[in-house]
Amino acid sequence: MSRIYLSIPHMGTLEEGYVREAFATNWLSSVGPNLVEFERAFSEIAGGLPCVALSSGTAAIHLGLKLLGVKRDDEVFCSSLTFAASANPIVYEGARPVFIDSERASWNIDPDLLEEALEDRAKKGKLPRAVVIVHLYGQSADLDRIEKACARFDVPILEDAAEALGTHYRGEQVGTRAPISAFSFNGNKILTTSGGGMLVARDRALVERELPASGRSSRAVPPWYEYRDIGFNYRMSNVVAGIGRGQLAVLEDRVAARRAVAFRYVEAFADIPGLELMPQCSYGRHTNWLSVFLLDERRPA
Ligand SMILES: Cc1ncc(COP(=O)(O)O)c(C=O)c1O
């Protein structure tokens, strides 16, 4: 029986060379040229924003929530249709996730329901500390409408772009508009480092001031062993970053391949009543991470 795999790693021609180089030069820790180059190249895709390579997408969401000031007993709104890691880090901080349902048009967070929920919390006098939105399966959420709702109440957004490297919203890479965004390089993502993540922030000062102490490494600031905060050793290794460096070079090939597969599914299943594929919103470039079906409850028996 031949299997169709869900999403397997595809290595290009450069990755192994960068990994070997790390061994040959003994850069086998959480600093080194692969990390510098991976972050630089990623930042080019992410509109020149500061990027910090971490051990996972979950770590990036966790540190991102900390940078946004999420604390015990806060509420954080979160997309309901997502992978658990969008919400888990909210709970790590002792905050409470409040799930907002999706809209049919994008399968991502419904901007109208989000606005209603924000209005409700404003009336009760306790707004959420942040809103985690997700660009699920490589489809961008409707950022303009979401941003408008959040700006009305001055609540910051964290973009979970774990599944959306290569995905565009109105011509721009997603995960670059909110104060904080997170990407994943887990083995099932469009690019993989075998496991890893990237935190992208709009505010360079915030990253430079807060991250060294709380997450970038277990390094102390000032440079002796005096810690002012609880740290998280979430840094990516220079070996793994070598894989990421090579993978970034083939991103556009991967996007084209995934889109081609997605459109093949659309065509192949067009005539089956009751099966609905994720729609492809006209405002963006989707990278269909998965071809998923919605089984319509009104489907004929
Ligand atoms: C939507 C979403 N958020 C977060 C994550 C977490 O990323 P990681 O597995 O790198 O921790 C993933 C993927 O695994 C994901 O699909």
Image: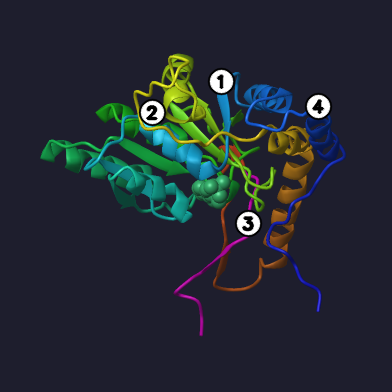
Percent position of residue 248, x then y: 74, 34
Residue 154 visible somewhere in the drawing? yes
Q: Mark 1 or mark 3: name the one nearer the start of the chain.
A: 1
Q: Mark 2 or mark 4: name the one nearer the start of the chain.
A: 4
Q: Mark 3 or mark 2: name the one nearer the start of the chain.
A: 2
Percent position of residue 9, x then y: 74, 51
Q: Amino acid at mark 2?
A: Leu
What secondary structure is marked by label 2?
Answer: helix
Q: Is residue 110 magenta?
A: no
Q: Residue at x 49, y 70 (%)?
A: 296
Q: Which residue is mark 1?
A: 49
C-alpha distance separating marks 1 and 2: 16 Å
What secondary structure is marked by label 1?
Answer: loop
Q: Which residue is mark 4?
A: 25
Front-most of 50 and 174? 50
User: Dot 2, crowdedness within 10 Å: few (<14), some or many (≥20)?
Assistant: some
Q: Is residue 297 magenta?
A: yes
Q: Residue furthest front?
A: 225
Q: Which residue is mark 2?
A: 67
Q: Which residue is mark 3?
A: 290
What secondary structure is marked by label 3?
Answer: loop
Percent position of residue 2, x then y: 81, 74
Q: Give the label, 1 or 2, closer to the camera.
A: 2
Q: Which mark is residue 185?
A: none
Q: Residue furthest bottom?
A: 301
Q: Give the label, 4 or 3, closer to the camera.
A: 4
